[in-house]
Image: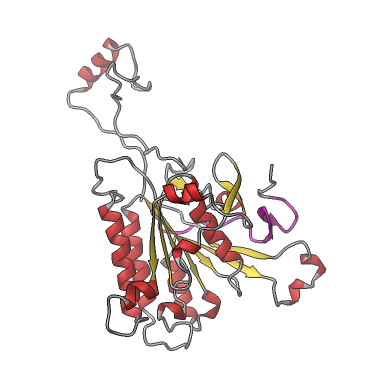
Amino acid sequence: MAAEATCSSGAGSTTSVAAAARKSNITSFQRRGPKAGGTESSGPRLVSIAGTRPSVRNGQLLVSTGLPALDQLLGGGLAVGTVLLIEEDKYNIYSSVLFKYFLAEGLINGHVLLVASAKEDPADILQVGPVSSSRFGHYYDVSKRMPQELLEASKCHGFFLPQKVSSTLKVEPYSLTHGYTKLLQFIQNIIYEEGFDGSNPQNKQKNILRIGIQNLGSPLWGDDICCTENCNNSHNLTKFLYVLRGLLRTSLSACIITMPTHLIQNKAIISRVTNLSDTVVGLESFIGSERETNPLYKDYHGLIHIRQIPRLNNLICDESDVKDLAFKLKRKLFTIEVREFLCFSSILR
């Protein structure tokens, strides 16, 4: 959803506009100050929400992914109204850390959270605590917990698939169609009922809805794309992403999805999933591979691949100039570096 400032022209001729400008002693290139009553006389401006900033490239409203290094690689942050797909590493160790960073960043900034999972109870996911902050985004310590008072003051909606499906349906509890359908209905209700719908805004203070979906497409969701190459329901996941993007495009929300793409047998499905995502980041862990003992990689825990970066309002996607990236996870720091040791971020101050 483009959150760019818009301008509207007033009624009257060019002469009357010029005369009005001379009378008020300003030009059309000067910003009008606030009136005596405290209201602005200018037209609509970019929405100002805590934890957001406009892109310097196109004015798109951005939120932090929770990792300043990743924000920089993605062009400043994650655009509101878009989907970030994280291709999980083999043992789902590091992708779950990025997932928690994204949600923790929302808690710190007072954003509303929607957490969906078929594996963990959403209440048990928010366990990472902040260490320090930068101008945009924070650093987190994976060994610390989020302060309890902050958790109690936050607004979080949880979708735990086993509870949502088995309590309302008399069919198989992990029915693929019902699992995805109920999640879409849940997201849609939150967007429309709580005023995140940008096309029909409600008269309330603006905020951001951060949506996190864990292990989407895995067998835990009842999907069989990871079990066989010629699966019977190969289009259900892509239909889900198609509808989800439609909901996000007209709302003040941003979504992060982790997916075990290394388990998907059919490469055509991976291609369709990539095309239906705005931003795609892949994590490759060194655990269990020959790189784990390779001296060239001794200082790192894995590689990070920027598969796709959105070029909003265009027909083609942008491509990252940096291809060879590695990451390492310390207790207080998740660092992303170029293999030539050019650090992109993350020196904890």
User: Looking at the image, which residue sits at the far left?
Assistant: 12
Q: Where is residue 340, by image quadrant?
A: bottom right
Where is the C terminus found, in terms of image quarters? top right
Vertical order, 209 against 171 (above or below):
above
Image position, residue 197 (x, y; %)? 28, 51
Image position, residue 171 (x, y; %)? 29, 84
Q: Which residues are magenta?
A: 315-343
Q: Is residue 76 magenta?
A: no
The residue sitting at 30% across, 57% down in the picture is 190
Q: Is residue 328 magenta?
A: yes
The residue sitting at 47% across, 77% down in the picture is 218
Is 218 on the left-hand or right-hand side of 287? Answer: left
Front-most of residues 349 and 4: 349
The residue sitting at 35% across, 70% down in the picture is 240
Vertical order, 217 against 299 (above or below):
below
Image position, residue 230 (x, y; %)? 43, 89
Is 151 on the left-hand or right-hand side of 44? Answer: right
Is 86 on the left-hand or right-hand side of 237? Answer: right
The residue sitting at 53% across, 80% down in the picture is 263
